[in-house]
Amino acid sequence: MPKTMEKPLHSVRFPGETPEYRSARDRLLKAELDLRKQVEEVIALRRRLPLGGPLKQDYVFDEDDGKPVPFSELFRPGKDSLLIYNFMFGPEMKHACPSCTSILDGLDGSALHVLDRINFAVVAKSPIEGIRSFARERGWRNLRLLSSAHNSYNLDYHGETAEGDQLPALNVFVRRDGRIHHFYSTELLYIPWPRGEEPRHVDSIWPVWSLLDVTPEGRGTDWNPRLSYAAG
């Protein structure tokens, strides 16, 4: 009985590609379609989360020249979701975290678009003067930068350990009927990691890995972002 040829998934072809390439690419494309479906299912599950606990306290952050800003004022009129990224830059750290810096380098360009839909802020434990100075060095223009130097937000919402070590974390808060509730956190950080892997809990907002993942070299096993790179 002759072998049934599978119907091509689409008609687009690239210069010089072989039948072997197209067959392998179609197998990958089917896997990509399955992954997209699973990602959409996960997103739908996240949207259906019930409200988490009420905000522990109306934390007061420092902004710009030490101006105090209560947590509740991070919500603008008509925008009831707030995304907060915990930037690993504590007062005892000689340098800001290179990986967090890589994330924020990318998010600075996206922030204006994000802010049209939701509230978004970046919180670090260092004094605001140090955070603003580092932001100027990086050329950040669009990120709302806050210092939690005088409150327990980082510790309460797991951007800091009891020993004072800083952690990368992404938390979402929502405002409902005038009250603020926690909604979501990137909890992959807290479960055991498979050997040789990292938690990847904030990868969805980290453009660097998305670009490397589509290349033959991939992420590699010994490369991580740095604060600066040699020229050439």
Image: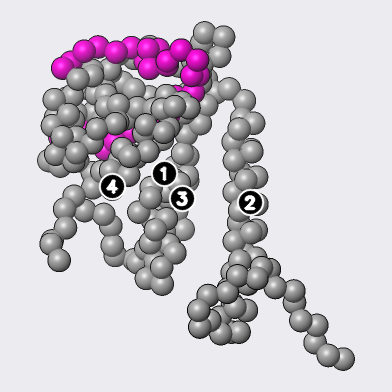
Q: Which mark is residue 38?
A: 2
The verdict on residue 68 being magenta is: yes
> For numbered disc 2, what is the local secondary structure?
helix
Q: Residue at x 30, y 26 (%)?
A: 144
Mark 4: secondary structure: helix
Gap in angstroms between the C-alphas marked 3 and 2: 22 Å
The reply to whether dot 2 and dot 1 touch (C-beta < 8 Å) is no
State the CA–CA distance, disc 2 to disc 1: 18 Å
- Say which element carries label 3: loop
Give the secondary structure at mark 1.
Answer: helix
Instruction: Look at the image and give the residue range highlighted in magenta.
Output: 65-92
Could you tell which of marks 4 and 1 lies nearer the N-terminus? Answer: 4
The amino acid on which the numbered mark 1 sits, given as a three-letter code, is Ile
Which badge, 1 or 3, comes first in the chain's sequence? 3
* Picture disc at residue 223: none
- Where does the image place residue 89, in percent across and percent down from the top left? 22, 36
Residue at point 19%, 39% (across, down): 139
Rendered view: 132 above or below 225: above
Specify whether residue 231 is in view.
yes
Which label number is shown at residue 192? 3
- Please tell me whether residue 178 is drawn above or below residue 211 in the rendered image: above
